[in-house]
């Protein structure tokens, strides 16, 4: 993995304070971590917004969730015919959910 130079303009006073602490603080690594975390946060927020948009179009079930869980455990499966647009929305939702779950597990507190 190669590196590139990133130049930013900051206040002179801030740069002077950074120079005073250069033997104590690894500024390059700290800024790199900040950028990595910010990218992860923005990607996660974007993915979650997409999931919310998909879920807005999913109808609310009249049946309580525990009934579905019990039917699954008991091996009673119901066959539903799903049109292609609903199926593709479900696939998109799962894709973003997995991406969000992965990003959350990578985030350190």
Image (cartoon, grey):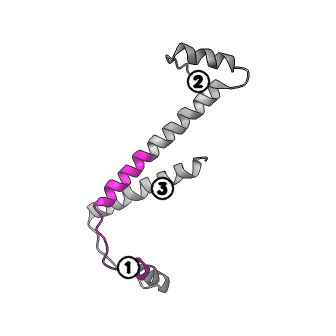
User: Tag 1's secondary structure?
Assistant: loop
Q: Please provide percent x and percent y for residue 25.
A: 69, 26
Q: Does 78 sit above or below residue 22?
A: below
User: Tag 2's secondary structure?
Assistant: loop
Q: CA distance from mark 3 to mark 1?
A: 25 Å
Q: Which mark is residue 3?
A: 2
Q: CA distance from mark 2 to mark 3?
A: 30 Å
Instruction: Report the residue marked by disc 3.
Output: 98
Q: Give the main secondary structure, helix, strand or loop, of the magenta stretch.
A: helix
Q: Does 46 sit above or below residue 38?
A: below
Q: Which mark is residue 48?
A: none
Whether residue 88 appears in this view of the structure is no
Q: CA distance from mark 2 to mark 1?
A: 54 Å
Circles 3, 1 touching at the beta carbon (< 8 Å): no
- Crowding near pointer 1: few (<14 within 10 Å), some, many (20+)? few
Q: Nearer the viewer, residue 32 or 97?
A: 32
User: Tag 3's secondary structure?
Assistant: helix
Q: Nearer the viewer, residue 23 or 46?
A: 23
Q: How many marks?
A: 3
Instruction: Report the residue marked by disc 1.
Output: 64
Q: Please provide percent x and percent y for residue 17.
A: 63, 18
**For discs 3 and 1, the disc positioned in front in the rendered view:** 1
Q: Which residues are magenta?
A: 45-67
Ranked by sequence position, the earlier of labels 2 and 1 is 2
């Amino acid at each position: 993995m190669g590196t590139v130079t990133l130049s930013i303009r900051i206040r002179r006073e801030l740069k002077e304070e950074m120079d005073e602490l250069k033997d104590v603080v690894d500024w390059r690594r700290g800024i790199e971590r900040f950028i990595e975390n910010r990218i992860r946060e923005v990607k996660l927020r974007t993915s979650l917004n997409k999931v919310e948009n998909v879920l807005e179009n999913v109808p609310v079930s009249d049946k309580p969730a525990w009934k579905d869980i019990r039917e699954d455990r008991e091996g009673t499966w119901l066959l539903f015919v799903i049109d292609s647009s609903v199926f593709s929305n479900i696939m998109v939702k799962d894709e973003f959910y997995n991406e969000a779950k992965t990003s959350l597990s990578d985030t350190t507190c």
